């Protein structure tokens, strides 16, 4: 494994809750709470969790779009706070691509104009040089060069997402946050975009944070996985270890929601359900964030927050935060539910 490109240490992000006509601050949303993980250079970390678990906020914090209330972020050995002070330094290093490129592309600009604008704003190319660069960017993302004349509304969803990727690539960043980039696309198109991203990573040594609520998507692209729930990490580790032997009941619930292609296995597979009770991010509970939805929760889960730790017979980088993960009945239930999820 190479040196970390991105390092988060105890990162917390909170948002004020404003109430009444005076917009007084009535509380805080604990969107991300003491999150630590590394992304090795040239690798992909899959950041997963249900809606509201803090994935996008984590991604935005990494590229300087959400202020940290606590903790540190290092990008390629440099502190994010220092990078933010030098104009343009952070965007040249890190870019973000969103789920809905339609919302992030200007409808009144053609594809060519959109890409040319980025090159010019960052002082990377102008005039004929910029035109040639636009052509090459379209080649890079597998789009025909004549699409430069088109406007976003005249493109398919997959083509729009390719344009959004080209726009991020124009700046030649080393790190890209991919926030649900394939979630709105048809399954066949999802595969094409995922392949494109993997090819680009291999050619250019790009580092990715791949954010998704759908574990089956990151199964093919991630080197390692980080599972968020209620703004905290429930489990993290190498992809294979997480998929074959999840340690946390929440990860197991996410895994058992991924359909297995073989119907015979699918029918017989036990499920770890989540009692549907999303956590209230403005009033975090003491103890485990997942306690109200967990089938295995006991008194200790309500009183004390479990720390991330490894277990003896698993990969040393595979960590989970659960008081009961070593108990035989929990392990047995989790491994039965995970069976088949990797096939
Ligand atoms: P995810 O991407 O996993 O769905 P988010 O990071 O978007 O989750 O949101 C995490 C929590 O932070 C949610 O409770 C959300 O409502 C809250 N949140 C996100 N952005 C803001 C904001 N700008 N202002 C207030 N609350 C926010
Ligand atoms: Mg999100």
Image: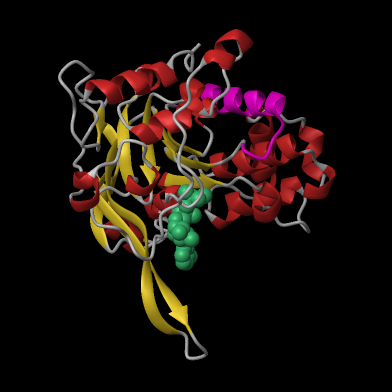
Q: Depth check: 121 or 39 in front?
A: 39
The answer to whether residue 39 of the structure is visible from this angle is no
**Number of marks drawn:** 0
193 to the left or right of 41: right
Considering only vertical position in the picture, is 13 above or below 273? below
| Residue 191 is a magenta residue | yes
Q: Give the prevailing secondary structure in the magenta stretch.
A: helix
Residue 144 position in % (x across, y down)? 77, 30
Q: Position of residue 120 (x, y in %)?
A: 59, 54
From the image, which quarter does the N terminus lie in? top left
Task: Note whether 314 is above or below 132 in the view shown.
Answer: above
Residue lying at 82% horizontally and 44% vertically, measured from the top left:
149
> Residue 224's spot in the image, x, y percent?
36, 27
Q: What sort of colour scheme is used for the picture?
A: secondary structure
Q: Is residue 284 magenta?
A: no
Q: Is residue 299 left or right of residue 146?
A: left
Identify the residue shown where x is 63% and y is 12%.
263
Q: Residue 300: x and y, percent?
A: 19, 45
Q: Is residue 258 above or below residue 171?
A: above
Q: Relative to 279, is 181 above or below?
A: above
Quadrant in the picture for residue 239 = top left
Q: Outermost residue, bottom direction? A: 22
Chain part drawn in magenta: 183-200
User: Would residue 50 be seen by someone viewing this image from the given angle?
Assistant: yes
Which residue corresponds to the image point at 26% horizontal and 26% vertical from the top-left? Answer: 318
The structure residue drawn at horizontal position 52% and vertical position 54%, both measured from the top left corner, is 122
């Amino acid at each position: 494994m190479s040196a970390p490109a991105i390092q988060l240490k105890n990162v917390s992000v909170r948002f004020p809750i404003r109430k009444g006509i005076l917009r007084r601050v009535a509380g805080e949303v604990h969107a991300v709470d003491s999150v630590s993980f590394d992304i090795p250079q040239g690798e992909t970390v899959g950041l997963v969790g249900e809606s509201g678990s803090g994935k996008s906020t984590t991604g935005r914090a990494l590229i300087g779009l959400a202020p940290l209330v606590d903790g540190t972020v290092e990008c390629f050995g440099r502190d994010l706070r220092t990078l933010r002070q030098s104009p343009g330094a952070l965007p040249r290093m890190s870019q973000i691509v969103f789920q809905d490129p339609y919302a992030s592309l200007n409808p009144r600009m053609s594809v060519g104009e959109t890409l040319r604008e980025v090159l010019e704003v960052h002082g990377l190319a102008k005039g004929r040089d910029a035109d040639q660069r636009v052509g090459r960017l379209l080649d890079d993302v597998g789009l025909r060069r004549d699409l430069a004349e088109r406007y976003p509304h005249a493109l398919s969803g997959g083509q729009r997402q390719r344009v959004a990727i080209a726009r991020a690539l124009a700046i030649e960043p080393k790190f890209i946050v991919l926030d649900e980039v394939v979630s709105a696309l048809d399954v066949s198109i999802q595969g094409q975009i995922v392949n494109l991203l993997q090819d680009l990573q291999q050619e250019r040594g790009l580092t990715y944070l791949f954010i998704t609520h759908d574990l089956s998507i990151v199964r093919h692209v991630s080197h390692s996985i980080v599972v968020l729930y209620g703004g905290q990490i429930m489990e993290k580790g190498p992809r294979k270890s997480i998929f074959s032997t999840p340690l946390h009941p929440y990860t197991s619930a996410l895994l058992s929601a991924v359909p297995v292609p073989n119907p015979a296995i699918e029918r017989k597979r036990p499920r770890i359900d989540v009692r549907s009770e999303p956590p209230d991010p403005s009033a975090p509970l003491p103890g485990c964030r997942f306690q109200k939805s967990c089938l295995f929760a006991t008194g200790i889960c309500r009183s004390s927050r479990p720390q991330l730790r490894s277990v003896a017979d698993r990969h040393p980088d595979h960590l989970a935060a659960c008081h009961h993960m070593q108990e035989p009945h929990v392990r047995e239930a989790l491994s039965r539910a995970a069976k088949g999820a990797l096939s």
